[in-house]
Amino acid sequence: YFYQNCISPLPPTDCLINYQKLNMNPRDRDDHDGEEEEEEELPQQVADLAQASVPTSMKGIRACKRCGILKTFDQFISEGCENCPFLDMADNPDRCGSCTSAFFEGQAAIMDPRESWAAKWIRADNYLPGVYAISVTGQFDRDIEEDLEARGIRWRCRPTQSQ
């Protein structure tokens, strides 16, 4: 598939558009002769990739303390975390501050989490496509930790080391 080989700096939606263009029949590209277009079903992986969230800026990037996805603080406020909707970060700046961390190491852009060895290595293979931190440093507030434990949910962040 083309989307697996899309190495351009374009957003994933541009990769999706290019995927659709490459799969068009050459005679359908120029002239439609008044025929209605049929909706071509996209593979699920391509549809997931179109929904991938990537940081809109290199400044102010934060990592979700549970899944490690990287976004700007404003993106977390406006969209929340698509992997962790139960953290209720959308439209809640205080919650975003306590559920994200500016302290993380490394980045991995994961396009196909179920097949990616890197996603398996950083334990992001059950999440949506996106850019993930290799490791996240920080700690949830005690009430959030208790809520996650009660739900049986694990998280990735590691506590800061006191010296």
Image (spheres, helix red, strand yellow):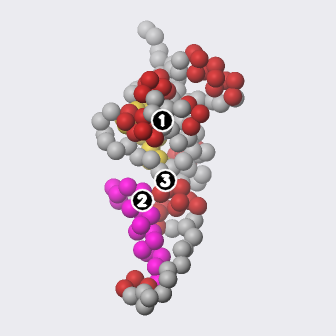
- Give the mark nearer the N terminus: 3 vs 2: 2
Which residue was labeled with disc 1? 90
Q: At label 3, which amino acid type do we have?
A: Gln
Pointer 2 residue: 13
Which residues are drawn in magenta? 8-27
* Relative depth, front residue between 27 and 115: 27
* Amino acid beneath label 1: Ala
Q: What secondary structure is the stretch in magenta mostly built from?
A: helix
- Cα separation, mark 3 vs mark 1, equals 17 Å
Q: Relative to 143, say whether 64 is above or below.
A: below
How far from the left and from the top, in percent, is residue 40? 54, 74
Which element type, helix, strand or loop, lies under badge 1? loop
Answer few, some or many: residues within 10 Å of disc 2's Cα (few below 14, many 20 plus, some between 14 and 19).
some
Q: Name the residue under label 3.
A: 51
Where is residue 36? Give x, y as percent.
49, 83
Which numbered disc, 3 or 1, marks the residue that appears first in the sequence? 3
